[in-house]
Image (cartoon, grey):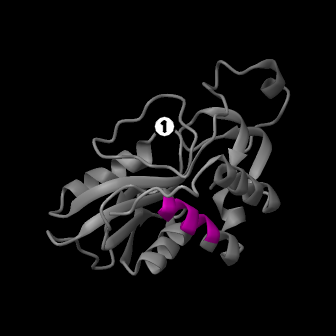
Amino acid sequence: MLQKTSRMTDKSDNEVISIFKETSALLTGHFILRSGLRSGHFFQCAQVCQYMDKVTRLAELLINKLRVDKPNTIVSPAMGGLVLGQEIARQLNCRFIFLEKVDDKLALRRNFSLCESDKVLLVEDVVTKGGRVAEALAILRATKCSILAVTSLVDRSTEDLNFGIPFQPLLKLEFPTYQPDQLPQELLSIEPTKPGS
C-alpha cells in the first residue's frame, strides 16, 4: 500500500505552491474554466510540464501522499493529465495509457484495453467540478479493471466531490468560482480568456 509519510506536511504544500509560482502556472485575471465557471485565478498545468525536474518532484510528492494499494496501471485523460500520469507511471513502474477526445468526448482508443488484473489509478491535472473525472470513470467502469482511486495535482472544487472511490489530490486550492451571470465587479471589468490546462 502507498502511504502518506510524515514528510507530507504544510511544508510540502508550500513547496508545491512555490513550484507553481516559479513556473508561472498560477495565473490571475478573468478565466473561463473547463467547467464553464469563471474565476480570477487559473492553474495552467502546461506551464509546470515544461520542466521535467518540476514534474518529477510533483509526482514524488503526490505518490508520497497517496494512501491506496499499489496500482499496476495509470490512466490519464488527455491532455492535462498526460505528462503527470506518465511520470507517476514511470516512478511506480506501471503501465501508462490515456483517454483522448473524440467528438469532444473522452474515449479509450489506440487498441488500449483494460482487464481484471489491472489495478488503475486515474491521474488528472486539475479538478474543478469533476465532470471529466466522472466521464473517465464511466469509461473505466465499463471495463473489468479495478479502480483504486483518483488523484490530481490540484483540487479547486468548492463542493465535496464523491466519485464513489477515494479522491486524493496533491493540493487543495480554494479560489472562488462564479457562474457567468454572477460575476463580481472586479471580473466584470476584465475580458475573459480560456487558456486551457
Outermost residue, front direction?
6
Is 145 magenta? The answer is no
Q: Residue at x 30, y 62 (%)?
A: 69
Q: Position of residue 154 (x, y in %)?
A: 57, 49
Q: Position of residue 155 (x, y in %)?
A: 54, 44
Q: Where does label 1 land, which residue?
A: 129
Q: Position of residue 6 (x, y in %)?
A: 54, 55
Q: Position of residue 113 (x, y in %)?
A: 23, 74
From the viewer's perspective, is 88 left or right of 31?
A: left
From the viewer's perspective, is 174 left or right of 75?
A: right
Q: Residue at x 60, y 24 (%)?
A: 179
Position of 151 relative to 63 (above/below)? above
Where, by quadrant of the figure, is residue 147 drawn? bottom left
Q: In front here: 174 or 143?
A: 174
Image quadrant containing the N terminus: bottom left
- Range covered by the magenta-colored residues: 57-64
Q: In front here: 4 or 78?
A: 4
Q: Residue at x 47, y 80 (%)?
A: 90
Q: In front here: 85 or 64?
A: 64
Q: Residue at x 58, y 58 (%)?
A: 7
Is 63 magenta? The answer is yes
Q: In front here: 179 or 114?
A: 114
